[in-house]
Image (cartoon, rainbow, N blue to C red):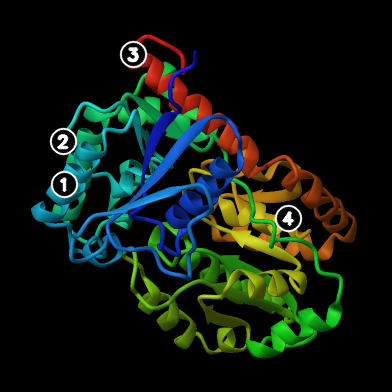
């Protein structure tokens, strides 16, 4: 007779994070819970989950009494206390999971047991360009220590693109045979909207001119996202096409990873022509983001490095193409639904955007490719690959296949 279902513990300390780590964790776990494949899942929280981010049916919950959650203790130049790490590790040991899963190495904490472990490394940006990710040398050293511990304790590694898998071999010295690649996908809320009035209302809400050729950036405000490079190209773009408008969508609160929001806003303020052509919307809920996508010509993604680039898939799912950096995983993800530029070459950024608007045939071609390209990504497929990784991890230790 078959034994009890494999019990997978999942670090849920990023669950309420509104950045990519949180979205990946929520979407991935929701997809895992929807599959009837004989695996049991328990989320391990450091704070009770809130109604804003509900836990899917069929997934169990345990919560440690850490006082503060990850979002409060690992922001900017702060770090989690030894007591926090001890409390989380002790709870995992008490649960006696068959496999434990970290959806992001960012939230890794030492496990006080020999439970087989899968850890997801989304990218190697911190190893490539640490000066753009860490406010102090101490933060960088702590990251290196955490990554070293995570590698020592994991049984298998996971990542979200072939690009990242190759980088993990090169930068983290993780053997390729120990790396499992899953994927990401857009939430079903991201879909084309045909009602032009909805799109116009979304523009009006944010003060975006009704007739503007709208470009949108969506994501974090960190230096490696290269928004400043895009802004530096904008005066040259609007000189040639005065109707171009850029909406920068993302939190400007400073409550997250180390960012350069003050520098970005100062650049726009100190360049008067940009004031009429750039809008900072702040954080926008998904439904409202979809409405803004409906009125946009393209997503601009100028990042210096990405491990996946989920906003690109979300935009393509709404039927809009991507004007993309040629770095990292973005060409792998965007495929033929985009145009590419060197993100460190302002002339290349300018020329690519101007070419997109001036060549109607090219614009139609990449726009038509957006929806088919987006359809190649699904959370169910990601969950299936994740299950394979968990079973492989358990088998690596036990010598059997679950």
Which residue is rendered at x = 53% and y = 52% of the image?
Answer: 57
- Compared with 328, 116 (above or below) is above
Marks 2 and 3 sit apart, C-alpha to C-alpha, by 19 Å
- Compared with 375, 174 (above or below) is above
Tell me whether the residue at label 4 lies in contact with that at label 2, contact meaning CB atoms closer than 8 angstroms: no
> Does residue 398 show up?
yes
Sooner in the amino-acid sequence: mark 1 or mark 2: 2
Q: Which residue is mark 4?
A: 317
**SS at mark 3 in the image:** helix
**SS at mark 2 in the image:** loop
Q: Which residue is mark 3?
A: 398
Tell me whether the residue at label 1 lies in contact with that at label 4, contact meaning CB atoms closer than 8 angstroms: no
Give coordinates of residue 47: x percent, y percent. 29, 62
**SS at mark 1 in the image:** helix
Locate residue 273: give its quadrant.
bottom right
Q: Nearer the viewer, mark 4 or mark 2?
A: 2
Q: Nearer the viewer, mark 3 or mark 1?
A: 3
Q: Which residue is mark 2?
A: 112
């Amino acid at each position: 007779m078959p034994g009890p279902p494999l019990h997978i513990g999942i670090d849920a300390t990023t669950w309420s994070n509104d950045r990519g780590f949180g979205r990946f964790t929520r979407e991935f776990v929701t997809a895992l819970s929807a599959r009837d494949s004989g695996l049991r899942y328990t989320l391990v929280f450091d704070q009770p989950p809130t109604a804003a981010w509900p836990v899917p049916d069929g997934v169990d919950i345990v919560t440690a009494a850490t006082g503060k959650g990850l979002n409060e203790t690992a922001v900017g130049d702060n770090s989690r206390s030894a007591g926090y790490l001890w409390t989380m590790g002790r709870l995992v040991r008490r649960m006696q999971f068959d496999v434990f899963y970290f959806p992001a190495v960012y939230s890794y904490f030492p496990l006080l047991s020999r439970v087989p472990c899968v850890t997801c490394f989304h990218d190697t940006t911190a190893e490539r360009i640490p000066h753009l990710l860490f406010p102090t040398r101490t933060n960088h050293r702590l990251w290196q220590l955490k990554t070293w511990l995570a590698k020592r304790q994991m049984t298998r590694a996971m990542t979200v693109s072939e690009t990242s898998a190759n980088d993990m071999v090169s930068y983290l010295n993780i053997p390729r045979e120990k790396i499992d690649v899953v994927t990401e996908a857009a939430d079903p809320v991201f879909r084309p909207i045909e009602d032009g009035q909805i799109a116009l209302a979304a523009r009006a809400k944010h003060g975006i001119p009704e007739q503007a050729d709208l470009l949108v950036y969506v994501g974090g405000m960190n230096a490696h996202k290269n928004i400043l490079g895009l802004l530096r190209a904008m005066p040259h773009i609007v000189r040639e096409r005065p109707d171009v408008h850029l909406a920068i969508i993302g939190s400007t609160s400073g409550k997250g990873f180390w960012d350069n929001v003050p520098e970005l806003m100062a650049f726009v303020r100190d360049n008067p022509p940009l004031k009429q052509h750039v809008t900072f919307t702040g954080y926008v809920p998904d439904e409202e983001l979809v409405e803004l996508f409906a009125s946009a010509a393209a997503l601009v993604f100028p990042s210096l490095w990405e491990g996946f680039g989920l906003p690109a898939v979300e935009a393509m799912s709404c039927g809009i193409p991507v004007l993309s950096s040629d770095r990292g995983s973005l060409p792998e993800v965007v495929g033929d639904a985009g145009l590419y530029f060197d993100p460190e070459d302002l002339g290349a950024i300018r020329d690519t955007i101007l070419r997109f608007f001036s060549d109607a045939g090219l614009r139609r071609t990449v726009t038509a490719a957006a929806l088919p390209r987006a359809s190649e990504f699904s959370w169910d497929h990601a969950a299936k690959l994740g299950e394979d990784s968990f079973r492989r991890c358990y088998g690596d230790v036990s010598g059997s296949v679950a």
